[in-house]
Image: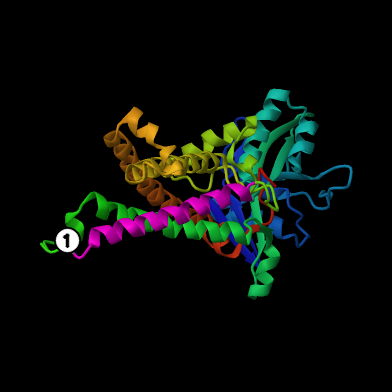
Amino acid sequence: MNARLQIDNIQLIVRTPVPFGDIGEMDLLRLAAAASDNNGNDPGDKALVHAAETCAQTVGWEQKTGSWTPPTNKRHYSTAVIRPAGQTTGDFEIARGSVDALMELCKLSPADKAAVRKNVKHIKRKGFRPSAVAINREGFWQFCGFVPIFAMRVPLSVRDAQTEFRYFHIWDWSLRLLHWMWVLCVLGLIATGFCIAEGWFIKFGDLESGNQFGNIRRLHFILAWILIGVVTMRFATFFFATNKYQKISALFPIKKQQWKDLYETGRDYLLAKSFDGPRYIGHNPLQQWTYTGVYGLFTLMIVTGLTLYALYEPANWFFGLFMPINDVLGVANVRLIHVIGTWCFMLFITIHVYLSALAGNVDRDGTISSMISGGRWLRKGVHFRDE
């Protein structure tokens, strides 16, 4: 359920209620609407009444005149007396407001509080805020659940739109430059690598050689050396980063919460539930381990590539350092590892581009544009683990 209401330039969304106990979703929604201030102009009250009339057909309750009392600094909930619509009996007290305040009012057990807070945590990740409801029918308060509400100001211009978001500078210009440099290098190395592995791809049936194969190998080696320089500089930037999102610690999720988020993020990516994963400003734990693996793959490809090149310069002191690898593994196995690494890169590139496009277009989190601009505009009210 997503009931929308726009009042002037404020758009409100009421999502499916989260009941506690035996009460139903629509019954909870009606109670939340009945607890609104009848004489007020609060947008949240109007959104709840609109949602009840739209999704539950009717509010079903009427409020006793003059019974509504507002929340205070010490009491974070409002109260009112309501009865079934059209009747003169059956009065009972209702409260609506802070989840924690109403759980204390109802004296929930620690286990029940933990269960409610888990649900609250889930909806807060998506930018919603809970409006809890409790009733007092027989002299004691009963916690009924909460209704998630989201409110945002509809921007009248691009300048106004920025007020609904926060800007975070994440990637330095040096990291962005190195990123796009190794994108070009890797694509060039894959293309030339296929030409080297499959000679017919170059010849196209031509029986006369114009040294095409030698030129392709030369280009492959040039791109490889550029990539070595780029990777070396990238490792150096880990120690000169201007924020925590770029430091070497961002590669390894070592906290207990990060391991939990690793499971949740992997599950949500697998099931394409892109809205439900834990939110991170920088890399989430799954991305951290993925990029750690990619850096390891870069290292493997560089070492095996230099090992293969050493066959043509065995007397050189530098390339001579890699000759023992050929002796131990065998040239054919080194070349096989190099080819398998190439296919791993192709698989990673496909998944990386797809998930980046998914996050940028579905979650609207600026994943792709941040690698160009260096920053992200992130919606206010959303909780981020690494903030």
Above or below, comparing residue 364 to residue 351 in the picture = below
Above or below, comparing residue 321 to residue 6 in the picture = above
Above or below, comparing residue 95 to residue 192 in the picture = above
Provide the residue designation for mark 1.
203
Image: magenta residue range: 210-238
Which residue is pictured at 61% across the width and 48% down the height? 236
Residue 214 in magenta stretch: yes
* Closer to the camera in the image, 122 or 36: 122
Question: Seen from this angle, which residue lies furthest bottom?
Answer: 157
Which residue is pictured at 52% across the width and 33% down the height? 263
Task: Kindly report the secondary structure that dominates the magenta region of the rendered protein.
Answer: helix
Residue 354 in magenta stretch: no
> From where the camera sits, is residue 305 visible?
yes
Q: How many marks?
A: 1
Which residue is pictured at 57% across the width and 52% down the height? 233
Q: Position of residue 5 (x, y in %)?
A: 61, 62
Q: Position of residue 193 (x, y in %)?
A: 30, 52
